[in-house]
Image (tube, rainbow, N blue to C red):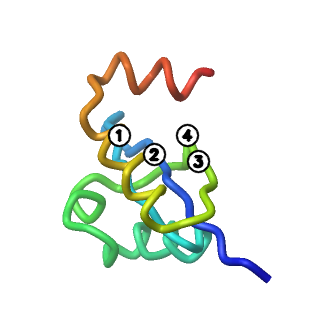
Amino acid sequence: MTKSFYTYIILTEKNTYYCGYTDDLDRRFEKHKLGTASKYTRAFKPVKYVYTKEFATKSEAMKEERRIKSLSRSEKEKLINL
């Protein structure tokens, strides 16, 4: 069984976006909800995933995370609404 990696965007309670990558979406979201995954989602509580994309390698997922983080909010919204 091959391992998959994911880049994701979470919508927060304050209507902001948080982008990251993981190899386990369910476990990562639980960590965000508990406030142990990042300082950002400790302050801005996560609501739901609004975007996920699967990759074969960690490197690919990290590259996509960097690309998404460089986008403006409106560009992120276009990506989410594809």
Label 3 to label 2, Cα distance in Å? 7 Å
Residue 5 spot, x, y in % from top left: 57, 66
Mark found first going from the N terminus, 2 or 4: 2
The mark found on residue 17 in the picture is: 1
Q: State the residue position of label 4.
A: 50
Q: Which residue is mark 2?
A: 9
Q: Dot 4 lies on which element?
A: strand
Mark closer to the chain start, 1 or 4: 1
- Crowding around mark 4 (Cα neighbors within 10 Å: few <14, some 14 to 19, many 20+) is some
Mark with earlier residue (1, 2)? 2
Distance between mark 2 and mark 4 Cα atoms = 6 Å
Q: Amino acid at mark 1?
A: Tyr
Q: Label 4 near label 1: C-beta < 8 Å?
A: yes
Q: Residues within 10 Å of mark 1 (few under 14, many from 20)?
A: many
Instruction: Answer with left or right where residue 54 lies relative to residue 75.
Output: right
For the residues marked 1 and 4, what is the alpha-carbon distance in whole angstroms? 9 Å
**CB within 8 Å, label 2 to label 4:** yes
Residue at 24% from the left image edge and 34% from the top image edge: 70
